[in-house]
Image (tube, grey):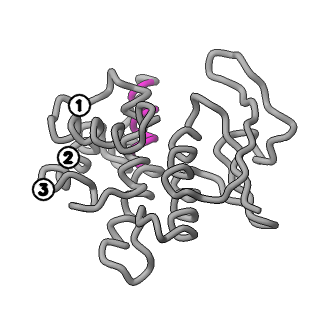
Amino acid sequence: MRTLYYSPNSRSDTVVALVRMLSADIAMREVTIARQDGSGSRDPANPHPEGKVPYLTDGDDAVRERGAIMLYLTDAYPDAGLGPLPGEADRGAYLSWLFYYQGVIEPLLILKWADVSHPAITAGLRDFDTMIERLAEPLRRGPWLLGERFSAADMLCSSPFFWFADMMPADPAIRDWVARCGERMGAGGK
């Protein structure tokens, strides 16, 4: 039996929304986590090696990191159509967006929020404005990152703008996309 360890009002909200949209038969296990404001604590019932969420177990296998969990689940529940499967059109773009989120979007958002900048960051990840332009490019051509197809990549890549509304760019292509994602995911899209 697959089990998702989650905590409300955390990064796991997007994966919880995905599980709901997939109509997936997954046990949901709420755990506590240490919060940025100093509240909460690591839950001994949470098997994640760092006490974080989300964390997915599937028998003896385990998956951490939101992009990896979302890929794992969209592949496991293909009937929902929330991620192209191997051999399908846009699979490469889908994988690229999931990994771009983990490797570029989230780090740049955190660095901007923490007011950290350095030439090595810009050389490796580029900068916040460049990242926003990468997001906006496909959204100017179609309503979703994959054109006409809404996917878990839209869910993942839009999610930080629900938490960091002050970082929402002025670009209407992104603003409208975030609103559409929120409508599709329900509950504000978190």
Residue behind mark 2: 136
Residue behind mark 1: 169
Q: Residue at x 54, y 67 (%)?
A: 77
Residue 141 numbered mark, or none = 3
Which region shows up in magenta? 104-113
Q: Residue at x 36, y 50 (%)?
A: 154
- Residue 85 locus on image (x, y percent): 44, 75
Q: Residues within 10 Å of mark 3 (few under 14, many from 20)?
A: few
Task: Give the image quarter of residue 43.
Answer: top right
Q: Residue at x 20, y 46 (%)?
A: 136
Task: Give the image quarter of residue 68.
Answer: bottom right
Chain-order first, disc 3 or disc 2: 2
Task: Give the image quarter of residue 58.
Answer: bottom right
The quadrant of the image that shows the N terminus is bottom right
The kind of residue tagged 2 is: Ala
Q: Are marks 3 and 1 in contact (CB under 8 Å)?
A: no
What is the tally of numbered marks visible in this picture? 3
Q: Are marks 2 and 1 in contact (CB under 8 Å)?
A: yes
Q: Is residue 136 left or right of residue 50?
A: left
Q: Secondary structure at mark 1?
A: loop
Chain-order first, disc 2 or disc 1: 2
Q: Residues within 10 Å of mark 2 (few under 14, many from 20)?
A: many
Chain-order first, disc 3 or disc 1: 3
Q: Whole-Å distance between the Cαs marked 3 and 2?
A: 9 Å
Residue 100 numbered mark, or none = none
- Residue 42 locus on image (x, y percent): 79, 31
- Residue 142 locus on image (x, y percent): 16, 55
From this viewpoint, which residue is outermost toward the bottom? 87
In front: label 3 or label 1: 3
Magenta span main SS: helix
